[in-house]
Image (cartoon, rainbow, N blue to C red):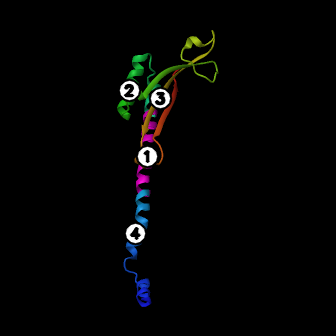
Amino acid sequence: MIARFRTLIRDRRGSVVIETAFVLPVLATLAFGGFEVSRIVARNNELQAAAAEAATVVMANPPEDQTDRDTIEAIVEASTGLATDKITMRQRFRCNADTLLVAAAASCATGAEISEFIEIRMQDSYTPIWTSFGIGNTINFDITRRVQVS
């Protein structure tokens, strides 16, 4: 019996299979996690690029009214694939050098220097597959750009 045990201890056949059985799940998890992270980063970059595109359009041709803002919103929707309710463009005003922006120029004091801004906001979410295993949560993207038009 002891001789047979010594023979089994020296036998190296099959050790690669056992080592692979230990390492393969870890490698697969790392590869899958890397893939999911790359999708998250890619979506964030896509949204940032769309925000930059919208800001460029606003600077090149400042919107005069809601129709113009809706047109720019449609451009952003087309480039991102986001639903209409995920993109908002709002007109905001700064009175003198105040830190807060207001919704109406009439909110500013008489004689105040009024600066006009267009605020572009995009919201999206991504649910990685690892959430189905109880790890992590849905990733929420919230991209905001402000462009001064006057």
Residue for point 40% across, 76% down: 15
Q: Residues within 10 Å of mark 2 (few under 14, many from 20)?
A: few
Q: Residue 109, how many percent across, how many down? A: 63, 11
The kind of secondary structure element at disc 4 is helix
Residue for point 49% across, 34% down: 142
Q: Residue 21, how many percent across, how many down? A: 40, 67
Q: Residues within 10 Å of mark 1 (few under 14, many from 20)?
A: few
Q: Disc 4, disc 3: CB below 8 Å? A: no
Of mark 3 and mark 2, the one earlier in the sequence is: 2
In this rendering, the label closer to the viewer, 4 or 3:
4
Q: Amino acid at mark 2?
A: Thr
In this rendering, the label closer to the viewer, 3 or 1:
1
Residue tagged by mark 1?
131
Q: Disc 2, disc 1: CB below 8 Å? A: no
Residue range of the region highlighted in magenta in the rendering:
30-51
Residue tagged by mark 3?
121
Q: Amino acid at mark 1?
A: Thr
The kind of secondary structure element at disc 3 is strand
Q: CA distance from mark 4 to mark 2?
A: 49 Å
Residue tagged by mark 2?
84
Q: Amino acid at mark 3?
A: Arg
Relative placement, left or right, of 106 versus 124 is right
Query: Hey, which residue is sitting farthest front in the picture?
Result: 1
The kind of secondary structure element at disc 1 is helix
Residue for point 63% across, 24% down: 99
The circle drawn on residue 20 is 4
